[in-house]
Image: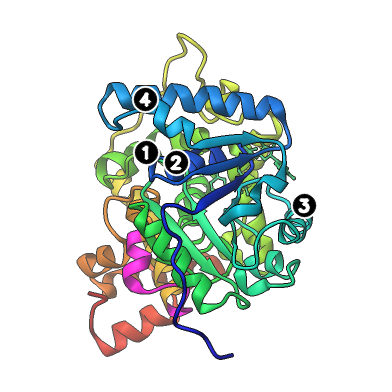
Amino acid sequence: MEETNNQQLITKNQIVGVLGAGSMGSGIAQIAATQQHNVVLVDLSTEVLKKAKASLTKILNRLEEKERIPSAQEVLNRITFSEKVTDFNNCGIVIEAIIENLEVKQKVFSNLETIVSDTCILASNTSSLSIASIASACKKAERVIGIHFFNPAPLMPLVEIIPAVQTSEETKTVSRQLIDDWKKVTVLAKDTPGFIVNRVARPFYGEALRIYEEGIADFATIDWAMTELGGFRMGPFTLMDYIGNDVNYTVTETVFAAFYYDQRYKPSFTQKRHSEAGWYGRKSGRGYYNYAEGAEMPAANKDEALGKQILDRILMMLINEAIDALFLNIATKEDIDLAMTKGVNYPKGLLAWADEIGLESVLNQLETQFNEYGEDRYRPSPLLRRMVKEGGKFF
Ligand code: NAI
């Protein structure tokens, strides 16, 4: 298909529509309004809209006190809170952040098309659904794209831009330019399960759970190894408790199924049982740790050799996942490293980290694991093998 190069960028005087005023939608509305756009924020529920307005008022007032924005009221005045999707009729772009359900999203996108102008871009903030299948609900599928923010959206710098097979070059360029203008760090990802971050990060949880299940170490020790020795901001169990075991387990299960049950992404019974027990983490007062008032946090076993063994095992799996993402052209090497440092605060990009450790050492460690367990989960990426054979580094 021939593409035109005379695309119209989305300017500050164009209205940004945000559908869904939950945690992601209200965060996206805050960003757009802070960036001088008039915003229409729509949700089905009046209750949710009221809450979003109250919480945005509080956040923006705090930002004004800290002199991060000149006027909270000015930003708030730019946001129209509405229950009517028809209020999107003048938008340059609508970003959808409603419930993570394909059928619902498809219905919503098909309906949006009857309301918005012909040139309006329709974006989804989905974390796990295929953009191609959302776009397939639209007559002008070329205007549909994935724009994936991280939680909390105003604070996390990374945004993954995910064109579907149907997405036009123009939609891709205009969308990315807009989010760059909002001073976010954008990376381009292929429309595959988990995009970059939620794919590459799987072993951070999965391998930590596996180490626990084998009885090698407890939660506190694994968390200590990853933070103290690895430099990660949060240990895997602290992070899963923060995200919520229900949410994190569902993402893992979705990614596992979407990859045709590739054993590398196999979910864990430990997490499933915690989720079934209602031990979601912080939000329920108990997860891997007990968050009740006065409850004591368990102490880690600070054995350096054990800690190093834990860190190396999880890190090699993360690096292998990053290398495989590059092997399959999910994103460029620069974007893969940026995604992990800016989307989930990893201390270093995984490919740069692999260079630092030495690719031969990474391959040796994975092969040792693979030979010992005989499980497909530990298979080294063909790209890693090739690079070790040919010599060379990622950067
Ligand atoms: P949420 O549950 O906080 O908010 C969803 C909102 O959508 C609710 O307020 C609900 O009333 C509204 N809604 C549902 N159906 C609607 C419809 N047909 N029309 C209008 N409003 C409707 O959910 P959250 O966490 O904000 O997630 C939204 C989307 O963002 C999902 O696709 C999720 O996968 C994705 N996402 C979530 C992240 C997170 O950490 N929570 C991170 C990145 C993406």
Q: Is residue 12 visible?
A: yes
Residue at (55% x, 90% y) in the render: 2
| In this view, the mark in front (2 or 3) | 2
Q: Is residue 313 visible?
A: no
Q: Nearer the viewer, residue 172 or 390?
A: 172
Relative to 64, is 294 above or below?
above
* Viewport quadrant of the C terminus: bottom left
Magenta stretch: give its range.
Answer: 327-338
What residue does disc 1 label?
234
Q: Residues within 10 Å of mark 2 (few under 14, many from 20)?
A: many
Q: Which mark is residue 224?
A: none
Residue 36, position in %: x, y?
A: 40, 44
What residue does disc 2 label?
33
Look at label 2 and name its amino acid: Ala
Q: Residues within 10 Å of mark 4 (few under 14, many from 20)?
A: few
Q: Is mark 3 within 8 Å of ligand 1?
A: yes
Q: CA distance from mark 2 to mark 1?
A: 31 Å
Look at label 1 and name its amino acid: Met
The disc, 2 or 3, on the residue closer to the chain's N-terminal end is 2
Q: Is mark 2 within 8 Å of ligand 1?
A: no
Q: Nearer the viewer, residue 37 or 65?
A: 37
Give the quadrant of residue 156. Answer: top left
Q: Nearer the viewer, residue 366 or 132?
A: 132
Q: Which mark is residue 299?
A: 4
